[in-house]
Image (cartoon, grey):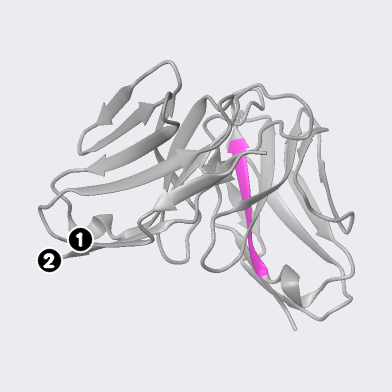
Amino acid sequence: DAGVTQSPTHLIKTRGQHVTLRCSPISGHKSVSWYQQVLGQGPQFIFQYYEKEERGRGNFPDRFSARQFPNYSSELNVNALLLGDSALYLCASSGRSGTGREQYFGPGTRLTVT
Amino acid sequence: GENVEQHPSTLSVQEGDSAVIKCTYSDSASNYFPWYKQELGKGPQLIIDIRSNVGEKKDQRIAVTLNKTAKHFSLHITETQPEDSAVYFCAATQANAGGTSYGKLTFGQGTILTVHP
């Protein structure tokens, strides 16, 4: 079975631009979470969506937004990019009713802001 | 909010030795503790987890122990192999938490494990 997939793999953007990252969860999973991983650190929670509704939100500015589609795939949008947004963005899916348990991560999207 | 501290930051062992990584958490309401292995250029891979109603869990060469009173949990890898070399992360969450923490995993800072042949 396919795991969590993310696109694109790598992305280079300029300060001030907008970016959209995409995630497809494991088949049958209805919960998708987004995390930001800065080099040398553990992932930081951004959002969780379950059944197309935002259920959890981390300590990130309003420039970060997300949505989940009827097929449970998800998009993460970041506006007005800053140099500090450069990171690996990870998507995780779970079939455990959005509780945070058993989250399976995708390979991530490496975002570089110049 | 929850805070997870992880030690050591780096760990070097000889093939066949055991490796132990320790984590402490701050929120006594946390009740689910997963461990992830992250290889270079890949996303974190869930390798084992433990719930707060269990003190120890084993899966082949990997085991996790949990001390709820002391609020710490540990990963034990026995008979280490070079392919165990990676960054290991512990995490904690309160399953079924309400509010903005719903579904939030709080991660430790990571341990770089190197297994020398």
- Which of A15 and B91 lies nearest the eye of the viewer? B91
How far is disc 2 from disc 1 in space, using C-alphas? 6 Å
Tag 1, which secondary structure?
helix
Which residue is at the far front?
Answer: B70
Contact between marks 2 and 1 (CB within 8 A): the answer is: yes
Asked whether B69 falls inside the magenta stretch, the response is no
Is A39 or B52 nearer to us in this picture?
B52
Quadrant location of residue A37?
bottom right
Magenta stretch: residue A90 in it? yes
Residue on which the image places disc 2:
B117
Residue B4 at x, y percent in the picture: 52, 44
Which of B16/A66 is in front? B16
Q: Image height check: is B32 above or below A45?
A: above
Question: Subunit of mark 2?
Answer: B
Residue A43 placement (x, y as % from top left): 58, 53
Residue labelled with disc 1: B82
Q: Quadrant of residue A98?
A: top right
At label 2, which amino acid type do we have?
Pro
For badge 1, the amino acid type reads Pro
Q: Which residues are magenta?
A: A87-93
**SS class, disc 2:** loop
